[in-house]
Image (spheres, rainbow, N blue to C red):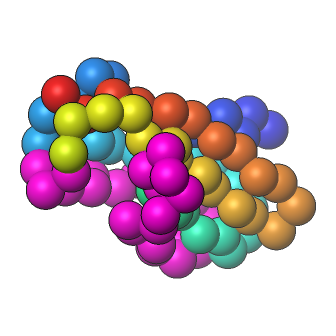
């Protein structure tokens, strides 16, 4: 099963859409480059979510998805 994170648009201005499939529960976190957690969301089975980022400062961010037996990360740029 492909467990990569689908994340678009990238770069983004006001929102990102995150897609992730897994057969279990997990959490999605968005960090800035200082390590501060800006978003922390719990999900079940699969994730397809529109996340507003219009309040984020311009720069690079890390999306991390932690599931039962996997940790996946992706980056995006807020313009």
Q: Image quadrant of residue 10?
A: top left
Residue 70 position by quadrant: bottom right
Name the residue at 46% across, 73% down: 41
Q: Is residue 65 visible?
A: yes
Q: Position of residue 42 (x, y in %)?
A: 52, 77
Specify the farthest residue to the front: 34
State which quarter of the image contains the N terminus.
top right
Residue 44 lies in magenta, yes or no?
yes
Which residue appears at 64% of the width and 41% of the height?
73
Q: Position of residue 50 (x, y in %)?
A: 26, 53
Main SS of the magenta part reads strand
Say how many tags the image has: 0
For residue 45, above or below residue 18: below
Return the x and y of residue 68 as percentages of the image width and height: 82, 68
Q: Against 53, is 1 above or below?
A: above
Q: Nearer the viewer, residue 22 or 57?
A: 57
User: What is the span of residues highlighted in magenta in the rendered image?
Assistant: 31-56
| Closer to the camera in the image, 18 or 60 | 60
Q: Residue at x 50, y 33 (%)?
A: 75
């Amino acid at each position: 099963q492909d467990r990569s994170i689908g994340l678009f648009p990238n770069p983004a201005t006001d929102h990102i859409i995150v897609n992730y499939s897994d057969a279990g529960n997990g959490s999605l976190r968005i960090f800035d480059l200082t390590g501060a957690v800006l978003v922390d969301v719990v999900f079940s089975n699969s994730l397809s979510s529109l996340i507003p980022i219009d309040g984020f400062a311009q720069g690079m961010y890390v999306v991390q998805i932690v599931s039962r037996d996997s940790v996946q990360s992706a980056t995006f740029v807020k313009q």
